[in-house]
Image (cartoon, rainbow, N blue to C red):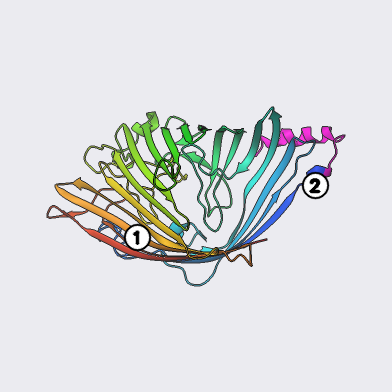
Amino acid sequence: MRKILPLLVVLPTLAHANLDKFISDSKIKTTLRMDYIDLHSNGLGSESFGFPDYDMGTWAQSAKVALTSGYYADHFGIDIDAYAVDPIGPQGEGFSTREIVKADENGNPKGFVKLPQLFLKQKFMLGDTSVEFFEGRRVLKEYGGTSVEDNAAMSSYNSLTSEIKNDNWFVKLGYLMEYSDSDEDDSSRLETPEGKGIDYIATSDFNYRNGDNEYRYYLTESQDYMRKQQFRYSRLVSPEVFSVPGKFTAVLTWQQGLTNYKNMSATNRMFDDDAMMLELNAELFLDDNYIKFGYNYTDASRKGSLGKFVFNMADGVQGSQDSFTSGNAWDYNNHREHAFLLMAFHDFTDSFTSGLDFRGGFFSYGGDTVTQGEVSFVNVWHPLSIPGLSVSFVAARDLSFKQAFDNTPYMVNGKFQRSKGHAWVSTIMYSF
């Protein structure tokens, strides 16, 4: 945040400019929210690994006030978000793993207040191209290989970022220096899983659209720890080409461990040198229905144990969630895992949508075929008579495998051991 101070000194020199648009174009949005999670697992690991029966239930209420300013002198502005979160009702012993409410020094739930966003913004037009600069703490959703936790409060980054847009291009550039998790009220330095400091995460994310074709390439690197690249191609198809309107997408994501990654102990390295994921999916857009199919294959070799693709670009820092293998209950990105997705949603009315989300996968380990999966029944209600109200309810069941904290499966007589759980999740939001 110290980097903001020089700009705060410069702004008063523009006092000759008219403040009318800065004030008249400013907007304040208030959001009230309640999150309830009843989440149980009967075996994240064996008795020796811990957590043989785990309650991760949590319940919280929150409020958010977001100020989006207009532009001073047509170029300069400031955005501020403020959250207040409080626990309500009983909490499971593993409530803190959901990052909804904060745990105090004794492990008890407590409320908190945070500013997930406080940044200066600058905007310039070069012909039909908009060039924007942002400096400060900012929520960065799907910014190359990084993203944010969207819980009762949102995670964010202390960063220098820029966005360039026109009819065909959307480019996102970022230099990220600190991270504030969704249940933390302050920022912390970026680190490897073994506590070695990471000075920055640098990312460049290029998106190009030309007619029915969409292209994306990003390169994200956390200093001396991890490098990640993604190539994505999508094509929209019309009913004249295919029987129903749809979208087909192919994605290749590759990551490489750098010096500080390779120097970590074997238990903290989820893959040896590099890892890759290939994903294919198809979306169908019908009158009142949405259907999506997906297939993903992961290659993440690891000596002596089960390898896994790593989403996070630093320890505890949310990685990109643009792959369906980052599931609601489990991740489906183990070495040589074949993963599948089926989503089907129907608009019963203009206000109510309901459907199923199924994800599953299988791979071989220790001579056995390990399977895992989850199914979620999703319902969303947004009444037209109350435009700012949204109510969602999800009921889910999941099956996976018992494992150690380093992803090693717990095997008995050459057979993997089953883990299973359930979740009831509800979120009520009202914005005005």
Q: Residue furthest left?
A: 413
Q: Is residue 61 left or right of residue 343?
A: right
Mark nearest the camera among 2 and 1 is: 1
Circle 2 SS class: helix
Q: Residue at x 13, y 52 (%)?
A: 414
**Which region of the structure is painted magenta?**
1-20
Q: Nearer the viewer, residue 216 or 43?
A: 216
> Does the stretch in magenta take in 16?
yes
What is the chief secondary structure element of the magenta stretch? helix
Circle 1 SS class: strand
All told, the count of numbered labels is: 2
Q: Residue furthest right?
A: 16
Percent across and percent down for residue 135 are 65, 37
Q: Is residue 414 left or right of residue 374?
A: left
Q: Is residue 199 left or right of residue 415?
A: right
Q: Earlier in the sequence, mark 2 or mark 1?
A: 2
Percent across and percent down for residue 259 are 38, 28
Disc number placed over residue 375 in the picture, else none: 1
Q: Nearer the viewer, residue 338 or 351?
A: 351
Question: As shown in the figure, which amino acid type bears the numbered disc 1?
Answer: Val
Residue to which mark 2 is pinned:
23
Q: Quadrant of residue 267?
A: top left
Q: Quadrant of residue 98?
A: bottom left
